[in-house]
Amino acid sequence: MGQIFHACAYDIEAKTCCTLEVDKFHANCYSYSGGVLTMHYLLRKQPYHIMWGGKYVIESRAFNYFLQRQSDIYGLSTYLSAERLGNYLDEPSERELEGIQFIRENEGSWNRINAQQEAICFFDWERTRSVIYSDYLVNHTQRLAVDLADYFSRSKMLSINGIVHVIDAVPFLTETGGGTPMALVGVSIDSTEKLATSWCGDLLEIVDAIPAGYSLIDCCLADVKGRARHCYKHFGVNEDGYLLGDENGALFEAAGHFITLDRTGILHFKVTETENGLQFCSKIVRRLGSIVDEIRFSGSNI
């Protein structure tokens, strides 16, 4: 079946929230996705706590982890019901019972808003098919910031249908767990996939300048297939047919990974023409783990 997620923005003091069911992570984590548009729109209006909340919070018995911070429990109460929690948790601990009771007391008290149509108009989605990648995504809880223009430039991918897009930083950073690996076959070498979930439940905002005392972090995330297509279109191959990764002639490098996002090996890609179009085949440059699967895919529509 797979894990279903909800995109949740919530203002704890005003008890206002916006929640959208966004299907599996790899179905709606992109720059053109409705949930991403809505979260970006709201964050450009004011700060919100953000949680890209998955149902495995219950099913994997991870519920206890989210009872450590009140802001996280509030986030769970925007998309989970106490009744559902009680049905899934067999013989809940005293701490879990307290968490269920907290959600029972808060799940019905939210002033729920729906900002998706406003977001579509704000970003002119019918024409742009994307949120705006300028300014800074800031984390007021941790006093950190991501340069959205830099994130887009380094994470930019090309779909098999020729659509330029990225896996957006908001779902990637704020998911409750298990989603990000499902969107990746492997990653471009400079991806920071280990940041997945590290901003979950934090107070975020999109602003035009980094606040004083905040640190700009290195952040990008690109699936190997989409990034390779992008690089082929813009940089081509070297004389031996290996894919280039930038305008300076450096080879495109990627990493395979386990479901845990642990890297297994560094890869280069040879591009060959076949009767069905282009084919990308990986070459293992260096092993980092016990297994490195060959990554092979076509690019006939590039």
Image (tube, rainbow, N blue to C red):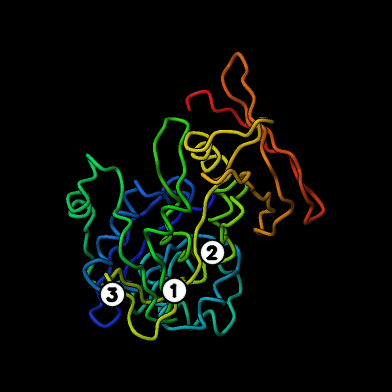
- Total marks shown come to 3
Q: Residue 254: x percent and y percent? A: 64, 48
CB contact under 8 Å: marks 1 and 2: no
Q: Is residue 206 left or right of residue 27?
A: left
Mark 2 vs mark 3, CA separation in Å: 20 Å
Q: State the residue at coordinates (62%, 31%).
A: 297
Which residue carries the number 3 mark?
47
Q: State the residue at coordinates (82%, 53%).
A: 290
10 Å crowding of disc 2: few (<14), some (14-19), many (20+): many
Which residue carries the number 2 mark?
196
- In primary-sequence order, the first of circles 1 and 3 is 3
Which residue carries the number 1 mark?
216
Q: Residue 137: x percent and y percent? A: 36, 68
Q: Residue 130: x percent and y percent? A: 31, 47
- In primary-sequence order, the first of circles 2 and 3 is 3
Q: What element carries label 2?
A: loop
Q: Is mark 1 on a helix, strand or loop?
A: strand
Q: Is residue 141 left or right of residue 263?
A: left
Residue 1 in view here = no
Q: Is residue 155 left or right of residue 163?
A: right
Amino acid type, callout 1: Leu
Question: Quadrant where the N terminus lies?
Answer: top right
10 Å crowding of disc 3: few (<14), some (14-19), many (20+): many
Mark 1 vs mark 3, CA separation in Å: 18 Å
Q: Residue 190: x percent and y percent? A: 58, 57
| Residue 283, disc | none
Q: State the residue at coordinates (58%, 27%).
A: 298
Q: Does 189 sit above or below residue 278?
A: below
Q: Does 75 sit above or below residue 141?
A: above
Q: Does 243 sit above or below residue 21?
A: above
Q: Is mark 3 on a helix, strand or loop?
A: loop
Depth order, front residue of 71/171? 171
